[in-house]
Image (cartoon, helix red, strand yellow):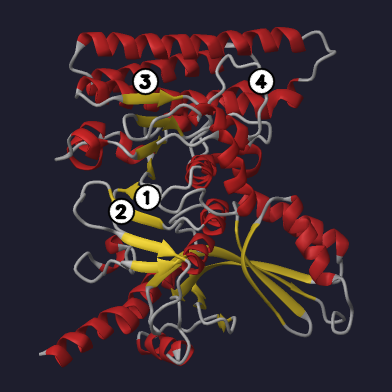
Amino acid sequence: MTTRPEDLRVAESRGAPVNARNKHTVEKIGGTSMTRARELLDTILIGKRSDGALYQRVFVVSAFAGITDKLLEHKKSSEPGVYALFAHADNDHGWMDALSGVSRAMREINADIFDDAGDRNAADDFVRERVEGARGCLIDLQRLCSYGHFQLGEHMQTIREMLSALGEAHSANNLTLLLRRNGVNARFVDLTGWRDESQPDLAERIENAFADVDFARELPIVTGYAQCREGLMREFDRGYSEVTFATIAALTGAREAIIHKEFHLSSADPRLVGTENVRKIGRTNYDVADQLSNMGMEAIHPKAAKKLRQAGVPLRVANAFEPHDPGTLIDAEPAEGPGVEMVTGLPVTSLELFEQDMVGVKGYDAAILEVLTRHRIRIVSKVSNANSIVHHIEAPLKAIRRVERDLAERYPSARITTRRAGMVSVIGRDLKGLNIMYKGLTALSELGIEPISAQETGRGVDVQFVVASEDREKAVKALHHAFIESESEGALAQAA
């Protein structure tokens, strides 16, 4: 089934799938799963499927694990990659050597994936073309900017996008070759804009790429990065692949959007509370997905979730290596009854501004928010009273120190303090009537944990407990036992 571009535009403008009875799904594979690409052949890609059952699916892929770190910078340690080295280059050797290292890493992945020499050579040629093309572009840009009429800083965002695109193009091309070798009519759908002089918006880029795709006879393998006029990385940085995935699902009117992970969406981190104690969520809604995102446990990027929700496309989070398990369905439906679905924790910094003369004076909150926004500080939660405002934030220490300095200059008589803390959230579609606050405080007290604060919004979807940093993991275990494990034990006892 081929969907016409004009129908895609209508679908987007109405915020609904063009055809609610469309058969195809749009599915995303993350970088960690991609490193096990050969295993994926036996699970979600082929498995026991044959003939028509192989199709009516679209796969959006991320770069192989570690490649984007080498191209940009390490996501956790901030160790510089090609982009960071190029941005601060005193000479050419640093970023050039790093780019050569990326090429070697990609070819090592090729050698690991492909048994067939022809496929391996084709994959290596693809890497060589893309990497050397990027190298030539960066050299030319350095030479151009050396004349002084052109400023390198004006092009850094474009460079970041170009480099990032190399990773997704590599993984999508490899998966296409691998599937073809195994008898699947796979089609490489390159959204990276390589050697494309046009500047379409995201919808146009996708429409053009899918204009002649036949979902019933082809298996599209799509790059997670899409070059477009908006500049995905400018707004979403490294969350762009989920936005691409969601936009494709919404525009093509997919029956369902599926994210394949290496684990199930569970009631807590199994590494923390024990695999025997967690339970798969199974069914939840986009409201809960947003709360999880706020707590750093993204089932999906919130902007991507918004696209799917507005288009009426349900999302499924599944384990890529347990293909027979349906995973967890996320849609817009309310819960059938009240219940806790997840307990999760996040390290935060509590930033408190105390000003004795604040009471009755407007503007403090707006001024603090302006400083936090300027320094790109993510706010997890906030609370205030007559003369103090506390923001629980997630940010590196260096950025927090800059915020403190700016606030001290603006409010010289205020007392500004920061301390490391842990936020633990009890989340569910409907928590009303469950006395979560009281029961949670009781569970923490029984373990000798004294909360710094606790709050709920009244919407009945989450209750937050702020504890000392060293008590965060212990608090997650205590609350999970109180609301998940005890409930399960009670249900088993009643059934017996």
Q: CA distance from mark 3 to mark 2?
A: 27 Å
Q: Position of residue 410 (x, y in %)?
A: 87, 62
Residue that numbered label 2 is attached to:
318
Considering the numbered disc 1 on the image, is that residue within a helix, a strand or a loop? strand
Give me the residue at 41% from left, 16% from top: 103
Looking at the image, is mark 3 or mark 2 nearer the viewer?
A: 2
Residue that numbered label 3 is attached to:
106
Specify the amino acid type for callout 4.
Ser
User: Considering only order in the chain, which callout, 3 or 4, is on the residue closer to the N terminus?
Assistant: 3
Label 1 environment density (alpha carbons within 10 Å; few <14, some 14–19, many ≥20): many
Nearest the eye: 236 or 90: 236
**Residue 442 in the figure: left or right of residue 114:** right
Residue 193: assigned label: none
Give me the residue at 40% from left, 12% from top: 126
Considering the numbered disc 3 on the image, is that residue within a helix, a strand or a loop? helix
As drawn, 426 above or below 496? above
Q: CA distance from mark 1 to mark 2?
A: 7 Å
Q: Quadrant of the C terminus?
A: bottom left
As drawn, 365 above or below 62? below
Looking at the image, is mark 4 or mark 3 nearer the viewer?
A: 4
Q: CA distance from mark 4 to mark 3?
A: 28 Å
